Image (cartoon, grey):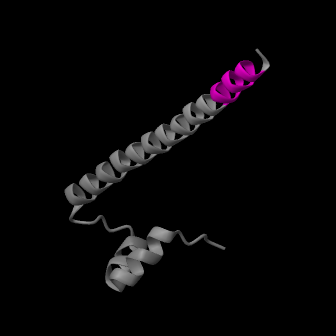
Amino acid sequence: MRTIRASEIGTYLFCRRAWGYFLQGVASQNQAEMAAGSGFHHKHGRQVMAANLARWLAWLVLLAAVIALAVALTFQFIH
């Protein structure tokens, strides 16, 4: 039994003939556009990863600031 990939379903929904060509091993004529799209998705993926990292760092800095404030207030009330 063969696994059907999501890209195959997308190809089939977009154009049944293109899906049939894919199954026959016929290369697409828009290779340049497909390469550009792959490059765009790769770049976008890196941007999403960087945004997620920045968000985690922001949460860590906020947590450190809250802890520092709690320590400072505790120290002030003790002395």
Residue that protrudes farthest toward the top in the picture: 79
Residue 24 shown left or right of residue 79 in the figure: left
Magenta residue span: 67-77
The answer to which quarter of the image holds residue 24 is bottom left
| Magenta span dominant secondary structure | helix
In the displayed structure, 1 sits above or below 40; it is below
**Could you say where residue 25 lies in the image, as x and y percent from the top left?**
38, 67
**Could you say where residue 32 lies in the image, as x and y percent from the top left?**
20, 55
Say whether residue 40 is magenta: no
In the displayed structure, 38 sits above or below 17; it is above
Closer to the camera in the image, 14 or 59:
59
Residue 26 shown left or right of residue 64 in the figure: left
Number of disc labels: 0
**Could you say where residue 11 lies in the image, as x and y percent from the top left?**
38, 75
Residue at image location 69% in from the left, 26% down from the top: 73
Q: What quarter of the picture does the N terminus occupy? A: bottom right
Residue that protrudes farthest toward the right in the picture: 78
Residue at image location 21% in from the left, 63% down from the top: 30
Q: What quarter of the picture does the C terminus occupy? A: top right
The answer to which quarter of the image holds residue 76 is top right
**Could you say where residue 67 lies in the image, as x and y percent from the top left?**
67, 29
Residue at image location 73% in from the left, 19% down from the top: 75
Say whether residue 73 is magenta: yes
The answer to which quarter of the image holds residue 56 is top right
In the displayed structure, 61 sits above or below 43; it is above
Closer to the camera in the image, 57 or 11:
57
